[in-house]
Image (cartoon, grey):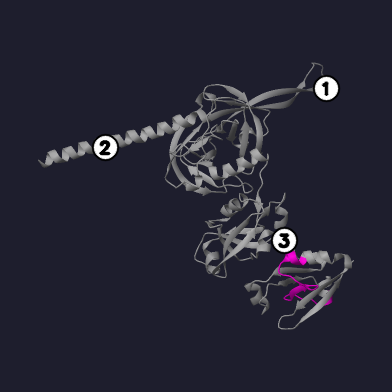
Amino acid sequence: MKKIIITSFLFCFIIAQNSVVRQFSKAFADVAEKAKPAVVTIITDKVISMRQFDDFGFFFQPNIPRQREFKTNALGSGVIVDAKNGYILTNNHVVDDMDGIRVKLIDKREYEAIIIGTDPKTDLAVLQIDAENLKDINLGDSDDLRVGEWVMAVGSPFSENLSHTVTTGIVSAIGRSNILNAGSYEDFIQTDAAINPGNSGGALLNMDGNLIGINTAIATGGYEKGNRGVGFAIPSSMANRIMSDLIDKGYVTRSWLGVIIQDLDNETSEALNIKTRNGALIADVVEDSPAEDAGIEEGDVIIEFNGKSIQNTANLKNTVSLTAPNSSNRVKVIRNGSPKTLKVTLQELPDNPQQFASRKRSDQKNFGMQLRQITESLKQKYDIEEKLDVLVVTRIDPNGLAYEKGIREGDVIKRVGTEKVKTLGDFNRLVQKTNNKGTVLLLVKKPGGASRYYTLNYE
């Protein structure tokens, strides 16, 4: 009797297991069937000019160069994201510096494509074709992705003959950065779904059939170009924001906080007396930046931006850049071991933000002194008892005007003229305001001493 029961149980288990497998298989097939018409093959043409030398057969005849042209082709993939307007999302490196772009659909129709806009920093591009009866894919929310979820990649690896190849795998990791280069904005989804040359720009789908990534790069671990189970896709949350700007403006608008940041490690976290190893450590605050105006200080650790946890510097960089300029944002920092929430109004990213990273402050408005906003560490260093927001002289040029007048390192600058100064932005604005008078009046307080006014005259 017991044998009969066990046998029956096993039989039912096998039937149930087969049923689950069939359902699982059907789910994959449904996603592929829905997605394939919206995935396209992109064939690009590049004309290369070469100089060729002809020999006319005479030993004294100089070689005469002439121009020859060769046409080369490259292959990539793309995803139709707006069937009505014919918009296609792909990688920038698929179409960059190409002379011709053709888009081939699953039904073998081909169309010439135009570039609506490109963004090399995220490796995204938007194309457009004039075609009817297109199918598109809905954008999913990549922020909801979890490691271990099943995903499907669709694209055209290696050749046109292998177009609309479907591969499956799982999400191996999220938030990957420093994969391509330091100057790019990276927040990659890592997957073990097979991605190969030609898959670039293709779709990464969740099991609801929604687009959650644009396949971009592979890590081979060597010189070969084939898949080794480590592929990277741009998340749809980033792609959607970039795509909207490219369609609306033809270029991408990014925001800027104005800080020099570094990742936390175990030793730094212990030295700062904080428990978390996540966040972005502020190494410097750029003069006249949104960060300075908001009161962000060196030594602060940004752990949240608008309620979203910040894992590392790349995470903060991406989050800030994708936030609208002139928007008001809540930034949570850890300062001297305690949490503090600040309100920051972002600005549009300058054309060359690197210039601010290396800009020296030691020659503040040519007076020969370096100023910084007061912090707890500066208070301890210079034995300052001042409780208000003021500026501290942290370096002085012995040959400068400020030194000549008697201002020294550790002095506190409280006012310019009759107006209080709390930030370097205040100082520069007020100095500029009095520039036409040829004299700047500073209220300076010596450590442990009284306040007095100093006049700095300049031509």
Q: Is mark 2 on a helix, strand or loop?
A: helix
Residue 423 part of the magenta segment:
yes
Foreground label between 1 and 3: 3
Q: Where is residue 294 in the image (x, y as percent from the top left)?
A: 65, 63
In this rendering, position of residue 398 left or right of residue 183:
right
Q: Is mark 3 on a helix, strand or loop?
A: loop
Q: What residue type is labelled 3?
A: Asp
Picture quarter containing residue 289?
bottom right
Quadrant location, the C terminus: bottom right
| Label 2 to label 3: alpha-carbon separation | 66 Å
Quadrant location, the N terminus: top left
Report which residue position mark 3 lands on.
Answer: 288
Q: Give the range drawn in magenta.
A: 404-427
Relative to 249, is 36 above or below?
above
Residue 4 part of the magenta segment:
no
Is any part of residue 93 visible from this angle?
yes
In this rendering, position of residue 62 left or right of residue 39:
right
Comparing 306 with 142, the one in front is 306
Q: How crowded is mark 1: few (under 14 residues within 10 Å), some or many (20 or more)?
A: few
Comparing 249 with 10, the one in front is 249
N-terminal-most mark, 1 or 3: 1
Report which residue position mark 2 lands on.
Answer: 16
Relative to 130, is 359 above or below?
below
Q: Which amino acid does label 2 sit on?
A: Ala
| Label 1 to label 3: alpha-carbon separation | 63 Å
N-terminal-most mark, 2 or 3: 2
Q: Which residue is at 49% across, 33% downward?
A: 154
Report which residue position mark 1 lands on.
Answer: 62
Q: Which residue is at 58% across, 47% downward?
A: 186
In this rendering, position of residue 324 left or right of residue 451:
left
Q: Position of residue 297 (x, y in %)?
A: 64, 66
Q: Most extreme residue toward the right, as rendered?
A: 459
